[in-house]
Amino acid sequence: MIDYEYKRPEKLEEVFALLQEYGHRAALIAGGTDVMVKIRNTKKAPEVLISLRRLTDLSYIRKNGDYHIGALTTHRMLEQSDLVQKELTALYEGASRIGSVQVRNVATLAGNICNAAPSADTAGPLLALDAQVTLHSPDGERRVPITEFFTGTYRTARKETEVVTEIKIPAHMEQFGSAYWKQSRRKAMNLPIVGIAVSLRLDNDAVSDSRIALTVAAPTPIRAYKAEEFLSGKPMDDAVLAEAGKIAASTDCCTLRDSLRGEAWYRARIIEVYVPRMARLAAERIQNAN
Amino acid sequence: MKKISVSFTLNGDPVTAEVPATWTLLKTLREYFELTGAKEGCGVGECGACTVIVDGQAVNSCLYPIPEAEGRSVTTIEGIAEKDGTLHPIQKAFLENNGVQCGFCTSGMIMSAKALLDQNPDPTEEHIRKSIAGNFCRCTGYVQIVESIQMAAKVKE
């Protein structure tokens, strides 16, 4: 029989006190679209669920130099934000393709990355957008680059005493265009077979800086650093982009595997094809920044 | 199992449920309030048969922990017709357009459609299709369902 206590703290300090009290016997829950499914499927639950939903202060999208997104911001809020759609387009594309309206209405951005599935739809965009994860504990706050946040499949750098409070995207991303492709069999209610997020900026038609992120391409969401290095300083022509795609799909960057949703060879082909396409799309989306 | 007390607004009326904290909103609706319009299809947020509206937003009630309902406003399919029994325009449109076959998905479909039309009275077909993308219907090709929602939007204007 599944049994647990359900706590509804209203302040961060109360969450810390509960985490202190229950330690590993407790789990945090936000929108619940992963936690509730896991409890039902495994028929196992922690002793205590600590709900973050009443911390309504942590639900916001702001630009103030950097971009600040509260941990409890739902995918629906991201999907309906003009700022996100225009300036953080890859994140808009990731958030708006998760589940269904019903899921996006409750599922949160921090929940998506804390669940840390290799397929998380916001993970690729956040990697491509240089996101930083802000964690709070009674000892204070620390920032972890998203590149160091995913430590394994369903594992993160978050400590038991910590709460993710904000996702920050640095102001320099304003000069980048970005795009995310979710390869899936349907348009909704689906996990990606593979996901490709690209952000870049140009200097006289050459790629001056880029980020290429892949999901379901390794045990965690990853950056394809070798492909980024190759692109650096090169013109945006077909041959260059095709080569960047090949490098991204190679073992220099990822460890593709066969799974129920798709085979490794297929994932590699999709990465080869979509790295160039997303790079082109990202380039088109660069705002006229100065 | 220890029960908790949760007070919220259900179809316009203030209610209090005394149920285990582990129950979902769906289970509470069906087994405590005996409102069986919202269905359990998959139970894991994939099929949308359990869709209800919480504070104006469509949610999967099968994934909604009942303690979270505290202080909120919940609307189910039982709460959208008028008190005298006159059907809601979306319900009428589903009937007139044969938007219903077996009926299992219908209450979820209508609640998703209602959440959409409440926020966007003049949706495109794309908006409609996206709004019901989380509602599975295994009888139809969705065409008559989409047409029903289009008709309801016209009527509401």
Image: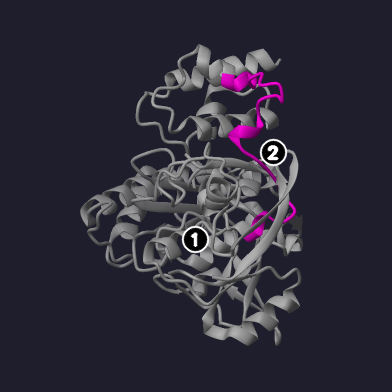
Residue holding disc 1: A36
The amino acid type of the residue labelled 2 equals Asn
The residues bearing labels 2 and 1 have C-alpha atoms spaced at a distance of: 25 Å
Relative height, residue A71 to residue A157 (above, below): above
Whole-percent x and y of residue A193?
A: 33, 51
The quarter of the image holding the N terminus of chain A is: bottom left
In the picture, measured across the screen, residue B140 lies left or right of residue B151, that is left
Whole-percent x and y of residue B56?
A: 69, 40
Relative height, residue B93 to residue B26 (above, below): above
Task: Indicate yes or no whether the magenta region holds residue B75.
Answer: yes
Q: Is residue A205 visible?
A: no
The amino acid type of the residue labelled 1 equals Met
Q: Which label number is shown at residue B11?
A: 2
Q: Is residue A38 visible?
A: yes
Q: Which residues are magenta?
A: B67-91
Chain for numbered disc 2: B
In the picture, measured across the screen, residue A273 lies left or right of residue B75, that is left
